[in-house]
């Protein structure tokens, strides 16, 4: 197989007997970008763009994908988070050499106080508290079983946060350490859930799909006897499998996984968060949100808006990985249907709820870019949002 995206794209296009103009017309991707990819003037493209090309050419996205990952964090983000990454990988200190050795009670309390910062997307505060908390958890992990459990939990959250801020290499390290330290299958499944998301953001569709399949098979419970924790773990792995499959143009597999996940949600009877963990919260509303996300991946804005209208607002957790991510899909659906007013209102609502989270979302920048391109004049709200997400002038 050719080594890069452009070569693969050109070979498949020729096998299908399509011209660049024909591929552009049917996929909605510009002739200019297709030409640049094939001629080596561009070596990467967003996963959304590659999926459109692959769907038009009737091949899995993974047949074309080379480097269709989300862009990593920029220099400003990397500089701001450097102390956290350094604390994450620093050698473990000796408790006997510390003036005030950490205690399990102290670290447990500090971690409990930090969880709302994670769920609320309060990045500035997390940058301040995480270095010391990571170092203390490392020290305790070598002294006490509960200390080891606290460290795994902190590494799970930190890996999720680093994925959220597109610091992919550090996220992979943190999640790998969390998985290695997991005490049981369910704790490991919680980490794998985030690992699958990380792989998806990196464009590693085949790896995400394989990992989700393996762990879903290993954790599949008997529904009549399953505990809520087991249903949540299994349901989330199926959602990750569905997300990987739909991006790889395997719509049947994506729908099958979504159907099984829905069965787990129905068995739960409602939204459930094991031990109050917002990362593992799962239920019928979560599945409905992911169904809308799949529809957006398949370029069905009409379906997204139809599904969104049926999702009870009160059932969505007010966290960035749930409600706010869904609202970006809604804003994108409005944009694709040229309903720019509601799109801007939706984005403004997200900014009000998560002002530190939104600037880290490349998806939001892409949506604003399409709004700006589709309007002859911009409102003050549009200009302000464009500044917030860092849309180039």
Image (cartoon, rainbow, N blue to C red):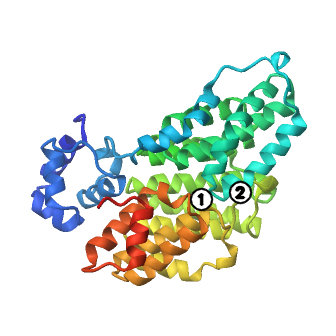
- Left or right: 221 as drawn, with respect to 241: right
Distance between the alpha carbons at the discs numbered 2 and 1: 9 Å
**Which of the 4 image quarters holds residue 149?**
top right
Let me know if residue 81 appears in the view. yes
Pinpoint residue 288: horizontal percent, then vertical percent: 59, 70
- The residue drawn where x is 47% and y is 52% is 244
- Which of 301/160 is in front? 160
Report the quarter where the N terminus lies.
top left
Please give the residue where the numbered disc 2 appears in the rendered image. Answer: 278
Crowd tier of the residue under label 1, counting other residues whose Cα lies within 10 Å: few below 14, some 14–19, many 20 or above:
some
**C-beta proximity under 8 Å, tags 2 and 1:** yes
**In the rendered structure, which disc, 2 or 1, sits on the residue that comes first in sequence?**
2
Pinpoint residue 211: horizontal percent, then vertical percent: 54, 41
- Which of 290/100 is in front? 100
Please give the residue where the numbered disc 1 appears in the rendered image. Answer: 321
**Which of the 4 image quarters holds residue 97?**
top right
- The residue drawn where x is 78% and y is 44% is 111
- Secondary structure beneath disc 2? helix
- Left or right: 184 as drawn, with respect to 125: right
- Which of 260/353 is in front? 353
The numbered mark at residue 184 is none
Report the quarter where the C terminus lies.
bottom left
The image shows residue 392, relative to residue 133, as above or below, that is below
- The residue drawn where x is 85% and y is 26% is 101
Let me know if residue 188 appears in the view. no
Pinpoint residue 272: horizontal percent, then vertical percent: 76, 62
């Amino acid at each position: 197989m050719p080594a890069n995206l452009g070569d693969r794209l050109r070979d498949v296009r020729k096998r299908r007997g399509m011209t660049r103009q024909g591929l552009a017309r049917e996929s909605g991707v510009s002739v200019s970008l297709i030409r640049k990819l094939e001629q080596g003037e561009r070596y990467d493209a967003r996963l959304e763009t590659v999926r459109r090309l692959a769907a038009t050419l009737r091949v899995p996205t993974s047949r074309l994908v080379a480097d269709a990952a989300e862009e990593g964090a920029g220099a400003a983000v990397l500089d701001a988070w450097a102390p956290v990454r350094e604390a994450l990988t620093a050698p473990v200190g000796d408790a006997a050499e510390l003036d005030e050795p950490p205690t399990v009670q102290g670290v447990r309390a500090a971690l409990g106080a930090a969880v709302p910062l994670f769920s609320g997307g309060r990045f500035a505060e997390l940058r301040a508290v995480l270095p010391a908390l990571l170092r203390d958890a490392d020290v305790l992990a070598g002294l006490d079983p509960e200390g080891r459990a606290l460290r795994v939990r902190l590494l799970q959250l930190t890996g999720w946060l680093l994925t959220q801020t597109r610091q992919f290499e550090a996220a992979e390290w943190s999640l790998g350490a969390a998985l290695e330290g997991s005490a049981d299958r369910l704790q490991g499944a919680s980490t794998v859930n985030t690992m699958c998301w990380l792989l998806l953001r990196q464009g590693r569709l085949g790896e995400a799909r394989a990992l989700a399949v393996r762990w879903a098979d290993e954790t599949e419970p008997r529904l009549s006897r399953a505990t809520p924790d087991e249903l949540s773990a299994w349901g989330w792995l199926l959602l990750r499998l569905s997300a990987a499959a739909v991006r790889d143009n395997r719509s049947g597999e994506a729908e099958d996984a979504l159907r099984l996940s829905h069965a787990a949600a129905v068995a739960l009877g409602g939204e459930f968060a094991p031990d109050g963990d917002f990362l593992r919260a799962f239920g019928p509303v979560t599945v409905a949100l992911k169904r809308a996300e799949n529809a957006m991946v398949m370029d069905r804005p009409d379906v997204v808006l139809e599904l969104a209208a049926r999702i009870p607002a009160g059932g969505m957790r007010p966290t960035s990985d749930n409600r706010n991510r869904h609202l970006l899909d809604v804003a994108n659906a409005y944009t694709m249907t040229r309903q720019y007013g509601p799109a801007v209102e939706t984005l403004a609502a997200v900014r009000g709820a998560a002002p530190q989270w939104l600037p880290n979302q490349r998806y939001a920048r892409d949506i604003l870019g399409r709004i700006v391109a589709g309007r002859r004049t911009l409102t003050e709200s549009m200009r302000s949002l464009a500044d917030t997400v860092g849309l180039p002038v």
